[in-house]
Amino acid sequence: AQSVAQPEDQVNVAEGNPLTVKCTYSVSGNPYLFWYVQYPNRGLQFLLKYITGDNLVKGSYGFEAEFNKSQTSFHLKKPSALVSDSALYFCAVRGRSGGGADGLTFGKGTHLIIQP
Amino acid sequence: NAGVTQTPKFQVLKTGQSMTLQCAQDMNHNSMYWYRQDPGMGLRLIYYSASEGTTDKGEVPNGYNVSRLNKREFSLRLESAAPSQTSVYFCASSDLTGGGDEQYFGPGTRLTVT
């Protein structure tokens, strides 16, 4: 079975500082990895994904994530945080077996709070 | 394009009542999904449909049924609602040409069962 761990329920960062939201995963074989963001009372919005190739993936709103196969991690990063980045962030994984049509397995989410 | 739409946005049911949550997408996607979101638990997959005419159980299917009405529409039915089904329900779709396609989510239905 596949799983995702987001070890921090909440991350607090001062505006302008770099931010990191941590994610580790467990899956058979090579993974597809995703980050989504959820603003209050809204659906999830796709930020970025790792499929193959370069371990550093760039996505929307200046976010990026680094895939580390040996550490089974896919941490979300941004060089300079904005107050508007405050939201709930989800890491998700899908394995490559079974045709890939099944759903994503999500972590529990990390609240990111950017302080002015 | 409206993307993924869900109706209703809010619903309150009494225990034992039934209802159907509706979902439609206008992106011509093959695959559709139903998730529930509970505080501190992330999103959990209820059912999915890899293509028109097929449906499969996800992680938490008990108490739910689904219908893939056509390529656009995927409904979720609660036959006899229970308080444990109080949750926010999200529908999603993806093109899934190779497994690495991202899913697009609707705005959600907030369901309360009393």
Image: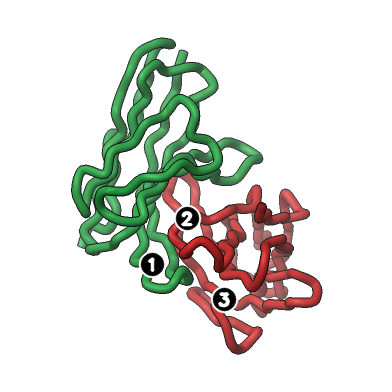
Instruction: Determine whether the residue tagged by mark 3 lies in a helix, strand or loop.
Output: strand
First of labels 3, 2 by sequence position: 3
Residue at image point 68% right, 78% down: A66
- Colour that chain A carries in the picture: red
Amino acid under disc 1: Leu
Q: CA separation, marks 1 and 2?
A: 10 Å
* Residue labelled with disc 1: B96
- Give a yes or no on whether discs 3 and 1 share a subunit: no
Measured from the top left, where is residue A4 in percent x and y? 68, 56
**Left or right: B41 as drawn, with respect to B83:** right
* Residue labelled with disc 2: A102
Using the rendered view, name the quadrant where residue B26 is placed. Answer: bottom left
Measured from the top left, where is residue B1 in percent x and y? 20, 63
Callout 3 crowding tier (Cα within 10 Å): few <14, some 14–19, many ≥20? many
Instruction: Determine whether the residue tagged by mark 2 lies in a helix, strand or loop.
Output: loop
Q: CA separation, marks 3 and 2?
A: 17 Å
Using the rendered view, name the quadrant where residue B65 is placed. Answer: top left
Chain name for mark 1? B
Q: Is residue B57 visible?
A: yes
Amino acid under disc 2: Asp
* Residue labelled with disc 3: A50
Measured from the top left, where is residue B53 in percent x and y? 26, 48
- Give a yes or no on whether discs 1 and 2 share a subunit: no
Residue at image point 66% right, 55% down: A2
Q: What colour scheme was applied to this rendering of the protein?
A: by chain
Amino acid under disc 3: Tyr
Chain name for mark 2? A
Query: Closest to the observer: B69 or B107?
Result: B69
- Colour that chain B carries in the picture: green
Callout 2 crowding tier (Cα within 10 Å): few <14, some 14–19, many ≥20? many
Instruction: Determine whether the residue tagged by mark 1 lies in a helix, strand or loop.
Output: loop
Query: Closest to the observer: B78 or B38?
Result: B78
